Image: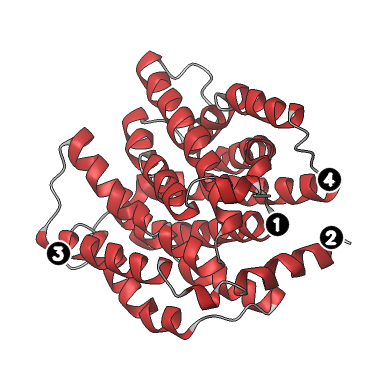
């Protein structure tokens, strides 16, 4: 008998689709022009109703979660809240391009965490392309073409890097212990925790504006539905079925897709170097994601380690 996961779509396709939805985040945040606390508060609050309906549907289908699962979802959500707040502020300081590039430090942190915690082997082919990956995302973000310049560059860079570490923690916790069948419940709990933690941290740069105006509210509603609901549900259904380095690398498509969104929605025009970076990121992401089947048992090591920790 086939399992639900075996009958569902290719997790790599779901991960890329989720990355596409989440890549709109920077555009929506910039268009809304609100404080980090306000953007985190509304993106999480407005996503809760549809997430609650999806979680209820999963419960009706007997997709139960344990207390250990809920604890992990809360921890993952807290890390996601840190990511939301720090990254939103870094966008304001150094721009969407370079901040999106720096957040992708997760591509190294996630496999490293899997190695340190579970002993998951890091494939040599992945280690070999890491320098190429970083070269690609650096070019995509505008380094070398003048696009990286901006006020408070040092502080914004630090915030973006810390955001990337928190983001890696979220991917690691969800990817190592989540279930595609309970993605709605996972994202619901994580979003609630992220809203609380992210709003609290974001308040350092300004209080929550409960009346941001209809235009800003519209952009925040679009952010809540596209990224917080659709994007994270797709990632919740894909990351648990992907090896750590594969999931982390596919998410590197976000800066590439963000440039496309900025072209279509904000009228921005990428430079030749940025387009070169896009090609490098897409090529290396495909290379890692299409690794030979013989390395698939690597994923089982992480899953077994997670179950051992839960006992």
Residue at image location 63% in from the left, 28% down from the top: 54
Q: Residues within 10 Å of mark 3 (few under 14, many from 20)?
A: some
Q: Which mark's residue is nearer the viewer, 1 or 3?
A: 1
Secondary element at tag 3: helix
Q: Residue at the front extreme? A: 1
Which residue extends farthest right?
311
Q: Residue shown at 58%/51% (left/top)?
A: 6
Closer to the camera, 180 or 218?
180
Nearer the observer, disc 3 or disc 2? 2
Q: Quadrant of the C terminus?
A: bottom right
Mark drawn on residue 66? 4
Task: Kindly tell me whether residue 137 is visible in this rendering.
Answer: yes
Q: Secondary structure at mark 1?
A: helix
Decide which of tag 1 and tag 2 comes sooner along the chain.
1
Residue 256 position in % (x across, y down):
28, 54
Report the residue marked by disc 3. Answer: 273
Q: Where 171 sits versus 210, above or below? A: below
Residue 177's label in the rendered image is: 1
CA gap between label 4 and label 2 equals 10 Å
- Residue drawn at x 83%, y 45% is 66
């Amino acid at each position: 008998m086939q399992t639900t996961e075996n009958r569902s779509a290719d997790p790599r396709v779901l991960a890329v689709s989720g990355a596409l939805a989440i890549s709109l985040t920077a555009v929506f945040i910039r268009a809304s022009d609100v404080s980090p606390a306000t953007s985190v508060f509304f993106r999480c609050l407005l996503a809760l109703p549809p997430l609650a309906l999806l979680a209820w549907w999963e419960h009706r289908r007997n997709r139960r979660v344990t207390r250990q699962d809920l604890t992990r979802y809360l921890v993952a959500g807290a890390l996601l809240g840190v990511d939301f707040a720090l990254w939103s502020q870094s966008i304001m300081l150094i721009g969407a391009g370079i901040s999106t590039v720096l957040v992708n430090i997760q591509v190294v942190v996630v496999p490293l965490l899997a190695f340190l915690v579970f002993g998951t082997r890091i494939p040599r082919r992945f280690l070999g392309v890491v320098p190429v990956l970083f070269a690609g995302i650096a070019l995509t973000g505008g380094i070398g073409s003048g696009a990286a310049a901006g006020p408070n560059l040092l502080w914004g860079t630090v915030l973006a890097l810390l955001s990337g570490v928190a983001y890696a923690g979220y991917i690691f916790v969800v990817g190592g212990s989540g279930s595609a069948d309970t993605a709605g419940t996972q994202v619901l709990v994580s979003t609630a925790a992220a809203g609380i933690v992210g709003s609290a941290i974001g308040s350092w740069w300004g209080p929550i504006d409960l009346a941001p105006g209809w235009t800003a509210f519209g952009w925040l509603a679009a952010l809540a539905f596209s990224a917080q609901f659709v994007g994270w549900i797709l990632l919740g259904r894909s990351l648990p079925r992907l090896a750590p380095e594969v999931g982390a690398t596919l998410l590197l498509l976000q800066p590439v897709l963000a440039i496309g969104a900025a072209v279509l929605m904000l009228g921005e025009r990428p430079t030749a170097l940025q387009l070169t970076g896009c090609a490098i990121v897409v090529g290396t992401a495909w290379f890692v994601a299409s690794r030979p089947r013989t390395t698939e048992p690597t994923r089982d090591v992480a899953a077994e380690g997670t179950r051992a920790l839960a006992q």
